[in-house]
C-alpha cells in the first residue's frame, strides 16, 4: 500500500454565525476575501486565496438549519484540510491503513468572478471528529480548481503568499503523531507541500506564542497558531496598521484579536 503524500489544501477558521463580523475583521487584517459563497450543504464562506493553499472562513447563516455540527466546535482555527486528486481511492487507502475515513461527500457552491459565473464543485473525505479533537481534519478533491485559484484573488494588502506552518498543541503529541503516521507515514513534524505541520506540547506552544496562543477551550488538542509567509514585513505592518490591528513586534496577532485564530506573519 502506498500512503498518500501530504499536501495542504487549506486551513479553516470557524466563526459560527458571525460571518459579517469575520468578513470585516479579516479584511482589516489585510486579506482580500472572495465574494461570499453559499454551499449546497448549508454553510457559507469567504476565502483568502494564496499561491498553493488558502484560508477559509466558514459559518452558518443566522437562519441555518443544516451544518449545526459547526456550532459544536469552539470559534477559531477549526480545520486542517489536505489535497487529494482521488477522494474515493484515498478513502480506500486510508481505511486499509486503519484510518477511519468516511465515504466521499460531494457538494458545490456558485461562484461569481470577473467575467463570469460557475459552480465550484468538491468531493471531501473526512475523519470522525473524535479522531482529531483539535479540529476537523479532512481531504478535499477540487473538481473545478479554476474557480478557486484565480489570479484576481491571490494578491493581499498584507502581503501574505501562503501558509508556512501550522502548530497544533496536544497534551500527548504522540497520539496525534500516530494518526499522521497512519495516514502519511509522518509523525509530529512533517511537510505538507510547502507547509510545515508540527504537534507540540501546550508548554511549547506557550513558549512560542505566549498569551497570543489560541484557547484550548477544554480540549486535549487544539490548533495553537498558523504562520504565514509574507512578501515584506513592512507591507504587513502598513496593512494591519491601516486596519487598526495590533501586530506585535514578533509578527503575532493574538487569538483574542482574531476571533480565536492566533496567527504569525513572517517574511
Image: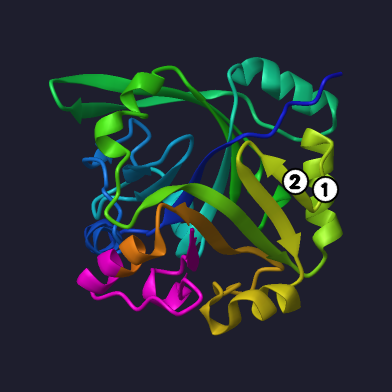
For residue 190, the mark is: 2
Q: How crowded is mark 2: few (under 14 residues within 10 Å), some or many (20 or more)?
A: some
The residue sitting at 84% across, 33% down in the picture is: 98
Q: Is residue 134 something that shows in the picture?
A: no
Q: Nearer the viewer, residue 172 or 64?
A: 172
Q: How crowded is mark 1: few (under 14 residues within 10 Å), some or many (20 or more)?
A: many
- Tally of numbered tags: 2
Residue 256 covered by magenta stretch: yes
For residue 97, the mark is: none
Q: Do tag 1 and tag 2 residues touch (Cβ < 8 Å)? A: yes
Mark closer to the observer (1, 2) = 2
Tell me if residue 146 comes above or below residue 61 in the rendering. above
Q: Where is residue 96 in the image (x, y as percent from the top left)?
A: 83, 24
Helix or strand or loop: what does disc 2 sit on? Answer: strand
Q: Nearer the viewer, residue 152 or 63?
A: 152
Q: Is residue 20 something that shows in the picture?
A: yes
Q: Position of residue 222 (x, y in %)?
A: 63, 63
Left or right of 154 on screen, residue 2: right
Q: Position of residue 168 (x, y in %)?
A: 66, 61
Residue 194 covered by magenta stretch: no
Label 1 and label 2: CA atoms lie apart by 7 Å
Tell me if residue 92 comes above or below residue 257 in the rendering. above
- Quadrant location, the N terminus: top right
Helix or strand or loop: what does disc 1 sit on? Answer: loop
Judging from the image, the colouring scheme is rainbow
Magenta stretch bounds: 238-267
Left or right of 17 on screen, residue 51: right
Q: Nearer the viewer, residue 208 or 179?
A: 208
The residue sitting at 41% across, 41% down in the picture is: 50
For residue 187, the mark is: 1
Amino acid at each position: 500500500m502506498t500512503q498518500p503524500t501530504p499536501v495542504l489544501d487549506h486551513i479553516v477558521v470557524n466563526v459560527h454565525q458571525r460571518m459579517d463580523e469575520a468578513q470585516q475583521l479579516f479584511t482589516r487584517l489585510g486579506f482580500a476575501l472572495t465574494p461570499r459563497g453559499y454551499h449546497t450543504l448549508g454553510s457559507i464562506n469567504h476565502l483568502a486565496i494564496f499561491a498553493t493553499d488558502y484560508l477559509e472562513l466558514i459559518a452558518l447563516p443566522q437562519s441555518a438549519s443544516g451544518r449545526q455540527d459547526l456550532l459544536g466546535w469552539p470559534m477559531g482555527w477549526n480545520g486542517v484540510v489536505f489535497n487529494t486528486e482521488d477522494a474515493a481511492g484515498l478513502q480506500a487507502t486510508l481505511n486499509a491503513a486503519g484510518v477511519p475515513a468516511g465515504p466521499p461527500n460531494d457538494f458545490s457552491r456558485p461562484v461569481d468572478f470577473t467575467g463570469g459565473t460557475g459552480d465550484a464543485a468538491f468531493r471531501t473525505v473526512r475523519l470522525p471528529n473524535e479522531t482529531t479533537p483539535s479540529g476537523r481534519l479532512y481531504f478535499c478533491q477540487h473538481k473545478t480548481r479554476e474557480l478557486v485559484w484565480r489570479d484576481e484573488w491571490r494578491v493581499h494588502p498584507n502581503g501574505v503568499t501562503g501558509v508556512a506552518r501550522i502548530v497544533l498543541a496536544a497534551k500527548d503529541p504522540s497520539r496525534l503523531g500516530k494518526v499522521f503516521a497512519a495516514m502519511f507515514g509522518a509523525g509530529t513534524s512533517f511537510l505538507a507541500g510547502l507547509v510545515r505541520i508540527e504537534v507540540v506540547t501546550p508548554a511549547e506552544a506557550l513558549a512560542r506564542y505566549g498569551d497570543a496562543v489560541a484557547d484550548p477551550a477544554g480540549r486535549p488538542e487544539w490548533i495553537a497558531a498558523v504562520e504565514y509567509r509574507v512578501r515584506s514585513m513592512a507591507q504587513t505592518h502598513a496593512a494591519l496598521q491601516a486596519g487598526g490591528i495590533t501586530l506585535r513586534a514578533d509578527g503575532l496577532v493574538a487569538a483574542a484579536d482574531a476571533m480565536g485564530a492566533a496567527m504569525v506573519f513572517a517574511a
